[in-house]
Image (tube, rainbow, N blue to C red):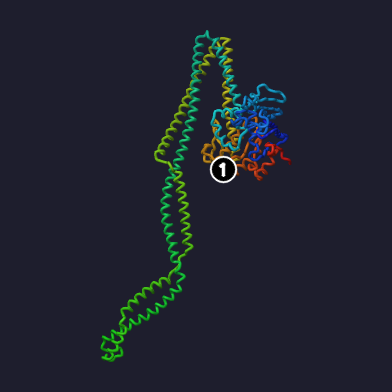
């Protein structure tokens, strides 16, 4: 299983007065849980481990007096704190101890931090730092001990030279590079002797001198090539940043067009809403009509009767006027003076004829209006309200969308759009130019190496003519072969390890991610920069991912790197789930038991609800709890009893 943490001893360390935390390694399980509420001392345990191993570089740059046990430092200001770690690896026991004292200098208290001590199986080692570096290198500490709440920062760790060196150290690449450097030194040493011995041979001396010149040229070109590669990577980063900004602006331009369409739609919807509101108001105004229909019917009937009577009178008057003018009555006899006098009297009785006619017209008009009211169909008031409310909701939603689009597109202008696309083109050309320079320098190096090979064969031929130089020439050839073999071994090993890390990281990432239908793996460049590959073939920059996705990527890389190394180191995680959502948490819980290294999780109850804890419990070696003794202001770690 590799290196495992067996015991932690804390003396006057922050909230721990005297505490021994033991991990029973006599088990085939590799997960330990240390539960504690916020402020109980979980992070203090992680900081103690880092400080013991790496001193002030392992903890935050605070006033170190803050790390002394508070009560002890108040009662006895000249107190001492210490942390001791016990690791086990392949039957060997390592004890690492570091102490610090609080001393009074004049009227001011200061701290004295001692160098660590390193004990292996009861024997003290003189250079503790070197042994610690060999066991758990300081440059790799972020891959062994880390805070889950800050784990998303690990997605950016691979951007620095220090981290790349740390990764190569974990993989054992520096040892191979040392082999190459030793071979190079041996080669130069033998070539120097050969050059000295063959100084009498002027032709050989000239070729050897020319060989040195070409080798110096190659070294210079290789330096230029390395610089060009760095510039190329920088240009790619700038190009990708410009592309990302251009993509954002394109999205904003699309949003501007969308904003225009939404504003036109808003105008149309506003007209519809106003009409719907008018319909509701009119419906409210007409709402009393149905209640008055019975009364309207009575008035209508009464008016209709009066109208009939008036019409009859009008007809009688017309007939009498006709008879008055006629010579013969309707009965057939002649109209005499007496009859005409009688008709005249009747007509005088209806002298108010004009008034009756006006009343008849008014009554007929009123009858028509009342008849219209009787035929009135009441509107569907509920339907009108529902339609108005629906339009109002649509209008409100549209207004909110317009406000959001206005906010998103604020500050976008044509000048910036043109400038960013100009930059995209310029940076793309810059990337091509840097790549062409790399290719050109690589060809020059290859040509120079071919020239060197030709010169070396000529020198070997000349050297073979003398027994002493012939022997040295063979030694040069062997040393050169060793150096070239070391180069090939380094290139193969780096490529193989990177492929292994990439494959392992991708597999773990597929297990953890909450988007298995979108992401198909993780890409790792020769410079160990990370990217998430989608099913569509696009490689996403970690900066574009959410906080939870960054954590998933970082954890996948850290565990993949741990698995790819030949000696798995313990993983100590404070707040293991950080920003992870529930799907990520569940996937991580399923993944943890598959890790071959020891895993120590410093967690609160919130990190492990009952269902998650039940799922992980079969793989847990021990559960420990941190409790507080408030009266003494100390924390105590205890093993949970079955």
Residue 470: x percent and y percent?
57, 12
Which residue is outermost to the front?
Answer: 107
- Which image quadrant is residue 21 in? top right
Picture residue at 73% right of the left edge, 34% below the top: 26
Q: Can residue 452 be seen in this view?
A: yes
Residue 121: x percent and y percent?
72, 25
SS assignment at label 1: loop
Q: Residue at label 1?
A: 515
Which residue is outermost to the top?
Answer: 200
Picture residue at 34% right of the left edge, 75% below the top: 361
Residue 419: x percent and y percent?
41, 36
Q: Is residue 372 above or below residue 162?
A: below
Q: In this view, does 403 lie above or below 424?
A: below
Please rate how many residues cluster around mark 1, counting C-alpha atoms within 10 Å: few if below 14, some from 14 to 19, many from 20: some
Instruction: Return the residue nearer the eye: 192 or 82.
Output: 82
- Which image quadrant is residue 320 in? bottom left
Residue 147: x percent and y percent?
61, 36
Q: In this view, does 476 lie above or below 431?
A: above
Q: Quarter of the image containing the N terminus?
A: top right
Q: Is residue 611 above or below residue 91?
A: below
Instruction: Return the residue nearer the eye: 160 or 500.
Output: 160
Q: Is residue 134 visible?
A: no
Q: Quarter of the image containing the C terminus?
A: top right
């Amino acid at each position: 299983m590799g290196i495992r943490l067996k015991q932690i001893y804390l003396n006057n360390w922050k909230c721990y007065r005297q505490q021994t935390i033991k991990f029973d390694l006599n088990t085939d399980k590799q997960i330990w849980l240390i539960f504690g509420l916020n402020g109980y001392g979980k992070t203090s345990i992680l900081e103690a481990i880092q400080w013991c191993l790496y001193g002030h570089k392992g903890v935050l740059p605070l006033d170190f007096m803050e790390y002394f046990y508070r009560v002890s430092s108040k009662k006895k200001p000249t107190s001492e704190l210490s942390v001791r770690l016990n690791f086990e690896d392949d039957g060997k026991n390592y004890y690492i101890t570091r102490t610090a004292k609080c001393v009074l200098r004049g009227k001011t208290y200061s701290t004295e931090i001692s160098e660590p001590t390193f004990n292996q199986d009861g024997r003290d080692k003189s250079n503790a730092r070197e042994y610690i570096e060999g066991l758990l290198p300081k440059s790799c500490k972020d891959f062994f001990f880390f805070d889950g709440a800050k784990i998303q920062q690990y997605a950016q760790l691979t951007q620095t030279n220090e981290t790349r060196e740390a990764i190569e150290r974990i993989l054992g690449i520096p040892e191979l590079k040392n082999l190459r450097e030793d071979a190079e030194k041996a080669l130069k040493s033998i070539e120097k002797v050969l050059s000295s011995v063959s100084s009498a041979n002027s032709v050989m001396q000239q070729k050897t001198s020319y060989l040195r010149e070409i080798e110096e040229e190659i070294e210079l070109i290789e330096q230029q090539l390395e610089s060009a590669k760095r510039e190329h990577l920088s240009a790619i980063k700038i190009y990708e940043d410009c592309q990302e900004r251009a993509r954002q602006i394109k999205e904003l331009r699309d949003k501007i067009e969308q904003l225009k369409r939404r504003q036109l739609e808003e105008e149309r919807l506003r007209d519809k809403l106003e009409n719907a509101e008018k319909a509701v108001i009119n419906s409210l105004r007409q709402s009393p009509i149905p209640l008055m229909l019975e009364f309207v019917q009575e008035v209508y009937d009464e008016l209709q009767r009066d109208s009939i009577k008036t019409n009859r009178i009008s007809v009688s008057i017309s007939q009498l006027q006709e008879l008055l003018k006629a010579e013969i009555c309707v009965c057939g006899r002649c109209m005499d003076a007496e009859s005409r006098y009688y008709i005249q009297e009747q007509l005088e009785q209806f002298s108010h004829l004009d008034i009756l006619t006006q009343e008849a017209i008014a009554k007929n008009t009123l009858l028509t209006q009342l008849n219209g009211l009787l035929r009135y169909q009441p509107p569907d008031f509920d339907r009108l309200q529902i339609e108005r409310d629906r339009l109002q909701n649509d209008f409100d939603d549209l207004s909110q969308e317009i406000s959001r689009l206005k906010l998103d597109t604020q500050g976008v202008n044509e000048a910036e759009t043109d400038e960013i696309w100009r930059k995209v083109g310029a940076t793309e050309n810059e990337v091509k130019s840097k790549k062409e320079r790399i290719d050109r320098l690589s060809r020059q190096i290859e040509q120079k190496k071919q020239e060197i090979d030709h010169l070396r064969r000529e020198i070997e031929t000349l050297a073979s003519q003398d027994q002493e130089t012939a022997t040295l020439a063979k030694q040069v050839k062997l040393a050169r072969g060793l150096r070239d073999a070391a180069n090939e071994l380094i290139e193969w090993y780096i490529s193989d390890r990177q492929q292994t890390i990439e494959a392992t990281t991708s597999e773990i990432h597929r297990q953890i991610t909450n988007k298995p239908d979108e992401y198909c793996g993780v890409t790792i460049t020769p410079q160990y920069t990370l990217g998430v590959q989608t099913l569509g073939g696009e490689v996403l920059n970690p900066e574009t991912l959410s906080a939870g996705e960054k954590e998933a990527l970082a954890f996948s890389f850290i565990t993949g790197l741990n698995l790819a190394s030949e000696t798995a180191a313990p993983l100590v995680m404070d707040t293991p789930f950080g920003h992870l959502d529930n799907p990520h948490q569940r996937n991580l819980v399923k993944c943890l038991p598959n890790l071959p290294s020891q895993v120590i999780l410093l967690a609160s109850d919130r990190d492990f609800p009952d269902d998650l804890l039940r799922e992980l419990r079969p793989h847990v070696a021990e559960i420990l709890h941190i409790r507080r003794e408030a009266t003494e202001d100390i924390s105590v770690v205890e093993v949970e009893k079955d």
